[in-house]
Image: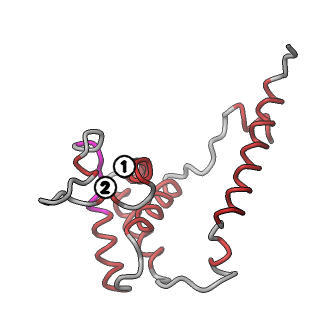
Amino acid sequence: MAKYPTSHLCLIMFELIAIVSANMQASYGGGYENQPPFGTPPACPEAEAIIFSWVQTAITEDPRMAASLLRLHFHDCFVNGCDASVLLDDNENFVGEKTAAPNVNSLRGFEVIDAIKSEIESVCPQTVSCADILAIAARDSVALVRCVAFIGHRILTIIY
């Protein structure tokens, strides 16, 4: 059996991931074609600024909140897709993910998302979903703590 250098295997894996991603985007639609500047403007143009402001304030008050919001988004997406179900409270007819064993007394940041949703609802009622708020808040948390590049991983030095 021939042995291939690790750099070749990494490059092949990278190419396979790129091909699969392109095929999935072509099959399921990327959604990017409807985003500005190519498509219609967002229904609530103020939403991203509101989310950014709240996330920035929360991280300033508690720097751990950046990781908490990213983790909250991960736990939401991991179970049944990114549907904001992790934000739902229990009631007599429903047991939410918030109180599930992996999440109870573990996840934080619910109050930040609630505050963001309240302000967005006052500006653009019934327009921006909680799932979108959670995804954008997670994105902004990563950006605010300047975790935009993961330099030092061997794969990056091989590919680039």
Mark identifier at residue 68: 1
Quadrant that contains the N terminus: top right
What percent of the width, then of the height, locates residue 8? Answer: 83, 30
Which is the main secondary structure of the residues drawn in magenta? Answer: loop
- For this view, does 93 lie left or right of residue 42? left
Provide the secondary structure element on which disc 2 rests. Answer: loop
- Locate the C terminus by quadrant: top right
Q: Which residue lies furthest to the left in this view?
A: 92
| Earlier sequence position, callout 2 versus callout 1 | 1
Q: Do the residues labelled 2 and 1 touch (CB within 8 Å)?
A: yes
Q: Where is residue 107 in the image (x, y as percent from the top left)?
A: 30, 47
Camera-side residue of 116 and 93? 93
**Range of residues picked out in magenta:** 105-112
Where in the figure is residue 77, as x and y percent of width and height?
44, 52
**Is 8 or 100 nearer to us in this picture?**
100
Residue 66 lies within the magenta run: no
Local packing at callout 1 (Cα closer than 10 Å; few below 14, some 14-19, many 20+) is some
Q: Which amino acid does label 2 sit on?
A: Gly
What crowding class fits label 2: few (fewer than 14 Cα within 10 Å), some (14-19), or many (20 or more)?
Answer: many
Tell me if I can see residue 63 in this picture. no
Please name the residue shown 68% across and 75% down the image: 33
Residue 39 picture quarter: bottom right
- Judging by the rendered image, the residue that carries numbered circle 2 is 109
Q: Nearer the viewer, residue 60 or 99?
A: 99
Q: Would residue 82 be visible to someone looking at this image?
A: yes
Q: Determine whether 111 is above or below 128 in the image.
A: above
Residue type indicated by callout 1: Ser
The numbered dot on residue 144 is: none
For the point 31% across and 55% down, the residue is 109
Question: In the rendered image of this protein, does residue 79 appear above or below residue 9?
Answer: below
Mark 1, secondary structure of its residue: helix
Mark 2 → mark 1, Cα distance in angstroms: 6 Å
